[in-house]
Amino acid sequence: MENMLEVKNLSISFGGLRAVSEFDMNIGKGQLYGLIGPNGAGKTTIFNLLTGVYKPDEGIVKLDGQDITGKKTIDINKAGIARTFQNIRLFSQMSVLDNVKVGLHNHHHYNTLEGILRLPHYRKVEKEMNERAMELLKVFGLEKDAEYLASNLPYGQQRKLEIARALATDPKLLLLDEPAAGMNPNETKELMETISFVRDHFNMTILLIEHDMKLVSGICEELTVLNFGKVLAQGPTAEVLNDPQVITAYLGE
């Protein structure tokens, strides 16, 4: 299997404290991969390193063979990494449709003058964007809510909208940061189906951070377990979750 993401020897310190140390991880194309670990293990720091929020002190990150180490967030997004956040970050005063269109701006362009004067090219691009945004909303069953304010959607639907907006940037790799946070069991079950569907429908490679072990064991094919910024275990999900070291890290001695 070809790798979509290759991470080698990734390390970063904050004020002398080593937050992530010599971190290695390979994710194959089309894989649904999980990054787990106790609170404070460094999982979100790794997402921030992968998306250019932080620059690593050492190590290499390659996306689909291209070295993206230390690039700016916007360039990494253009290279093909999109992410969602633990706390949903939608544009709450914009419509559901417009939230998705924000993501489409990576690939659809018109200049300011064309926009102000609503010239033919602007109208053509807007029409294409509306159609593409509606297609994405349909995938998530949100097309009926297109004109609603994003803030008026129920929590589970807001999470779906956030994933739809990330997909609008046409990524190669989708990073989901605790997508099940704050969800009830029914919403979590639906989210599991949504994530699996996104992988299959878009042929997407997905890396997720999650505390909900039911979700992790239900959909992730492989896992990396992080503890104190270092890899504790790596491999097929069932094996990793039965590893005594992993159980100890989660449950304490």
Image (tube, rainbow, N blue to C red):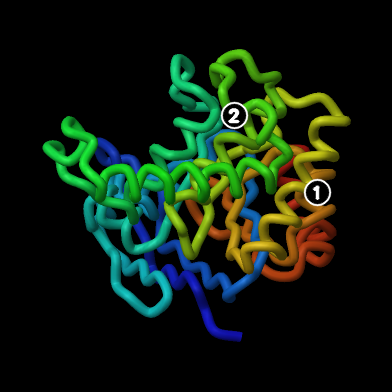
Q: Nearer the viewer, residue 84 or 11?
A: 84
The residue under the point 65% across, 61% down is 33
Secondary structure under tag 1 reads: helix
Q: Nearer the viewer, mark 2 or mark 1?
A: 2
- Residue 46 appears in the picture as rendered: no
Determine the secondary structure under disc 2: loop
Residue shown at 81% from the left, 66% from the top: 239
Where the N terminus falls, by quadrant?
Answer: bottom right
Q: Quadrant of residue 117?
A: top left
Question: Which of the two residues, 253 or 104, is positioned nearer the viewer here?
Answer: 104
Count neighbours of disc 2 (C-alpha within 10 A) and say few if under 14, some if 14 to 19, many if 20 or more: some
Residue at left offset 55%, top offset 21%: 150
Left or right: 90, with 219 as reference point:
left
Is 35 drawn above or below residue 67 in the view shown?
above
Please give the residue where the numbered disc 2 appears in the rendered image. 146
> Relative to residue 105, is residue 183 depicted above or below?
above
Q: Sequence-wise, which precedes: disc 2 or disc 1?
A: 2
x and y percent of residue 174 in the render?
53, 55
* Residue on which disc 1 sits: 193
User: Residue at 65% across / 26% down in the picture?
Assistant: 145
Residue type (three-letter) at the residue carrying disc 1 = Glu
Q: Between residues 9 and 134, which one lies in front from this camera angle?
A: 134
How far apart, in angstroms, are the residues tagged by discs 2 and 1?
A: 22 Å
